[in-house]
Amino acid sequence: MKRRINPLPRPPVPFRMIRKNKQVLLFNDKEMEAVNQFCKKYKIQSKSRFFREVIISTILQKMEEDHPKLF
């Protein structure tokens, strides 16, 4: 029995975190139409990536605004 050797082992992923948590979004028809039109107009190919970027950037912006100020 020959041992299979993988010629290209998977490199470690040091800079990317593994996504293991799932969240589901539901849109009504008008909201989905608006999202589709936006993605088509700006040539967005990955809606998942787009949603992640928009959500996280909004959260980070809000956290920065709400940051306690000493003076």
Image (spheres, rainbow, N blue to C red):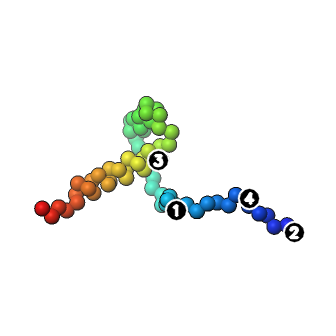
- Say which of marks 4 and 2 sits in front: 4
Mark 4 or mark 3: whose residue is earlier in sequence: 4
Q: Are marks 4 and 3 in contact (CB under 8 Å)?
A: no
Amino acid type at mark 2: Met
> In terms of secondary structure, where does tag 1 sit?
loop
Q: Nearer the viewer, residue 50 or 32?
A: 50
Amino acid type at mark 3: Arg
What residue does disc 4 label?
7
Judge from the rendering whether residue 65 lies leftward or rightward of residue 20; answer left or right.
left
Q: Which mark is residue 1?
A: 2
Q: Which mark is residue 14?
A: 1
Q: Quadrant of residue 69?
A: bottom left
Tell me where residue 31 appears, x and y as whole percent.
Answer: 38, 38
Q: Which mark is residue 49?
A: 3
Mark 4 or mark 2: whose residue is earlier in sequence: 2
Mark 1 or mark 2: whose residue is earlier in sequence: 2
> In terms of secondary structure, where does tag 4 sit?
loop
Q: CA distance from mark 4 to mark 3?
A: 31 Å
Residue at 32% across, 50% down: 58
- Say which of marks 1 and 2 sits in front: 1
Task: Decide: few, some or many residues near mark 4? Use Cα within 10 Å; few <14, some 14-19, many ≥20.
Answer: few
Task: Decide: few, some or many residues near mark 2? Use Cα within 10 Å; few <14, some 14-19, many ≥20.
Answer: few
Q: CA distance from mark 4 to mark 1?
A: 21 Å
